[in-house]
Amino acid sequence: MDNRVNKIRKKISELRLDMLATERAMRKDVAENLDCAAPATRLMALRAELTRLVGERRTLGDLAPIGLPDLRKPRFARG
């Protein structure tokens, strides 16, 4: 089980990097007033895959957070 969880964690990390790159491409298209339907659709597919992987990881018993910010904690502005 531990090996499967590690593989899922690695896939999640890769997906998050791919999501960042896709979001950057989408923002660039928006800034240039271009059609961003393709990157937006890709981003939605990546989010669906991420949700599936997180569910699978939790099913295997790994309940640790995946590195997303905790919105309940106060954040201080950087100077």
Image (cartoon, rainbow, N blue to C red):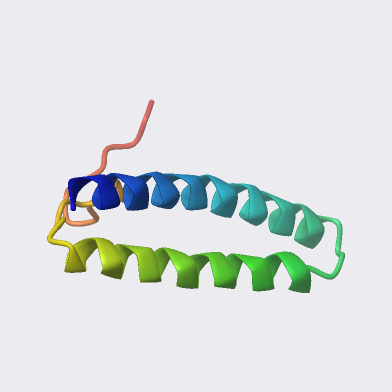
Q: Residue at x 70, y 56 (%)?
A: 27
In-front residue for pair 56/38: 56
In-front residue for pair 58/72: 58
Res. 36 image quadrant = bottom right
Q: Looking at the image, is 12 positioned above or below residue 77?
A: below
Residue 66 % position (x, y)? 28, 50
Q: Residue at x 34, y 36 (%)?
A: 77
Q: Residue at x 31, y 63 (%)?
A: 54
Q: Indicate left or right for 67 with 79 as reference.
A: left
Res. 55 image quadrant = bottom left
* The C terminus sits in image quarter: top left
Q: Residue at x 21, y 52 (%)?
A: 65
Residue 52 % position (x, y)? 38, 71
Q: Looking at the image, is 64 positioned above or below residue 30?
A: above
Q: Indicate left or right for 55 with 19 as reference.
A: left
Res. 44 image quadrant = bottom right
Q: Looking at the image, is 52 positioned above or below residue 27?
A: below
Residue 42 % position (x, y)? 65, 67
Q: Indicate left or right for 19 with 30 as reference.
A: left
Q: Indicate left or right for 15 with 78 as reference.
A: right
Q: Count the marks: how many?
A: 0
In-front residue for pair 17/75: 17
Residue 64 % position (x, y)? 16, 51
In-front residue for pair 6/45: 6
